[in-house]
Amino acid sequence: MTTRPYVLLSAAMSVDGYLDDATPERLRLSNADDFDRVDEVRAASDAILIGATTMRKDNPRLLVNSDARRAKRVADGKPAYPLKVTVTKSGDLDADLNFWHHGGDKLVITVDSAVEKVRATLDGLADVVSVGPEFDWELALDELGRRGVGQLMVEGGGTIHTQLMAANLADEVHLAIAPLLVGQPEAARFLGAANYPGGTTARMTVLEVRVIDDVVLIRYAPKKRA
């Protein structure tokens, strides 16, 4: 039986729950020390996942930036960079984005109707696999497990975080809270409306609270609800 990855959701948000503001430029919520912490978590993961919408909006490279951490991965018998993963139902991807041209191996998980479109667009820049006629997170995690992914770091966006939390598939959440207020209803939020496991009174277990300069990191265990 395939072992699914340990799913770790990672996000930085404003005090009022936003991942970004509504301007074209990305809002930098974290500070330098917290970005370094994120780099450390990336280095400890076997794969990093973002949604196609986040890729289009932020155009991230999604790398382990520390030379020492990459060297440690290689010394441990791992690739220098974790597998980079994106998911898409529409297949609307851009081959010119940074995601495809930096780091190591890439994987697109999609649905039957979009497989050929994605393969034609990317032209060998990534492995492409379908989980069937409809997107299914459990099948996607099974696929990653078959590929040897033990820890999956999910870096957004809000729709992805919401789906995984609602499906009770997130094992851990790293939430960095920045001392900012966005207040723009059209901006992206960490979580959206959903029927979350346990309802409104189910309290998640707090694993850690840490001050990182002007950011507060809170680690939660979503499956440990009271």
Image (cartoon, helix red, strand yellow):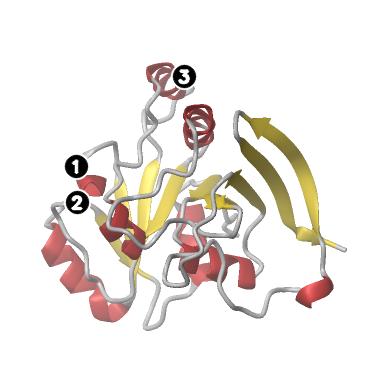
Kind of element beneath mark 2: loop
Kind of element beneath mark 1: helix
* Marks 1, 2: nearer the viewer: 2
Q: Which amino acid, by three-letter code, is at mark 3? A: Lys
For the N terminus, the quadrant is: bottom right
User: What x and y, as percent, mark residue 180?
Assistant: 54, 48
Would residue 26 appear left or right of 120 to someone viewing this image?
Answer: right
Q: Which amino acid, by three-letter code, is at mark 1? A: His
Residue 167 seen in the figure: no
Q: Which amino acid, by three-letter code, is at mark 2? A: Leu
Residue 51 seen in the figure: yes
Q: Nearer the viewer, residue 93 or 81?
A: 93
Which residue sits at x=35%, y=42%? Answer: 62
Other-residue count near label 3 (Cα within 10 Å), few / some / many at <14 / 14–19 / ≥20: some
Other-residue count near label 2 (Cα within 10 Å), few / some / many at <14 / 14–19 / ≥20: some
Would residue 137 appear left or right of 88 to someone viewing this image?
Answer: right
Of the numbered discs 2 and 3, the one sitting upstream in the chain is 3
Disc 1 and disc 2 in contact, CB within 8 angstroms: yes
Other-residue count near label 1 (Cα within 10 Å), few / some / many at <14 / 14–19 / ≥20: few
Q: Which residue is mark 3?
A: 72
Q: Which residue is mark 2?
A: 97
Kind of element beneath mark 3: helix
